Image: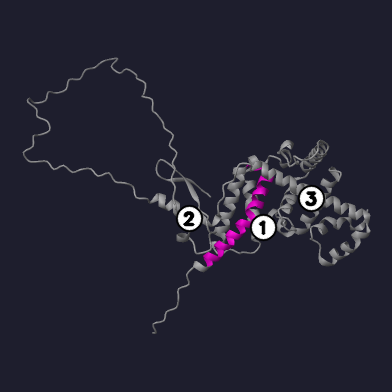
Amino acid sequence: MSGDSLPLPLPLPRFATDSCEATTLYRELRKPLLRYMVCLGLSSDEAQDVVQDAFLGLHRHLASGGSQENIRSWLFRVAHNGARNRQHSYERRFGTQLDPELDSISGEASPEQAVLEKEKLRRLRKAIGSLTESERECLLLRSGGLRYREIGEVLGLSTSTVGDTVERAIKKLAEKCNV
Amino acid sequence: MCDFSGKLVAWTDRELPDDEAADVEQHVPGCSECRTRVDAYREVSRAFVAHCDAAMRETTRLRLPHWVPVLASAAAAAVLLLMFRPTPVKQIPVVSRRADAAPAIVLETAPRPVKKVHRRYAVVPTKPAATVWEATVPAIRIAIPAEAMFPPGAVPEGITFIADVSVAADGSVQGLRLQQ
């Protein structure tokens, strides 16, 4: 037998690839995930915990050779289910959380503009409060940059159902806000 | 109502198939109703996003600690290090007894049998001494060089992490959180 030996297939290259993949996804999706969690009604700490768990799950998923397809919707789905498991805070309604004084009304706006902005905000909050849970979740995921197909994968809905739900929700908001 | 009104939201979201999107694109500029609707949908979508951003800012006003999920292995390593860290062993000096040393106790007379005294109210209930509990907050910081744990490029340069580990009285790890 010759002295040449076959190199052992060390797992390092795959590990490096997966780690880089996870790091890239972390940079790209951490903020949208946190935002989705917060808008679902979780506190800052709860949102961080859920998102951290989701990324740890992703790391395990990739390390165990899991599929890298549809990873964005995979992460959102895991985080969504994590939020579901925190029902006590999930029950808090997104539309009633914010203090209007704290919202993003520019400090440079004239008093008239500020009043108008506050009125628009009040109407928007009321309109958001009138959405169904599914409509709100679809809009939240849509505002996080997910495609209809991905939203469907997160919520367990068909793409066409997501399209109908988003359309219904947007029309409701436009109607109630008198835009 | 215009026939295209049911496709406008999907069109603004670029979710329509190419052929339908082309039809809508051709129709909208010439239809004032659809133009108004499209503007309204876009405005309300922007307002919704701004509202979400405001919710995010308000809730996370306190600075969020950062962490990286790829350091799950580092967390596991930290736990292992904690579990198997060498505990200092107290050395008890060994004293050899000399042969000519005096015995520890010298009895001049044989010990008498102990007389039992029965008292009806011998036992006086006493309050147990108040135990002073002190809150102990374990603060253990473990530094693991990233290059020792991961291949080059896996962890962004200049990022370090602190592992906050809660340790129970029996030495087991109760919780772990990575913070940047």
Q: Amino acid at mark 1?
A: Ser
Disc nearest the viewer among 3 and 1: 3
Q: Amino acid at mark 2?
A: Ala
Does A130 sit above or below residue B146? above
Rendered location of residue A53, percent (x, y):
57, 51
Does A51 sit above or below residue B157? above
Q: Which residue is mark 2?
A: B74
- Is A31 magenta? The answer is yes
Does A114 sit above or below residue B72? above
Mark 1 nearby-residue class (10 Å; few <14, some 14–19, many ≥20) = many
Q: Are marks 2 and 3 in contact (CB under 8 Å)?
A: no
Alpha carbon distance from label 2 to label 1: 26 Å
**Which disc, if any, is residue B45?**
3
User: Is A11 on the left-hand or right-hand side of A138?
Assistant: left
Q: Amino acid at mark 3?
A: Ser
Can you see residue A8? yes
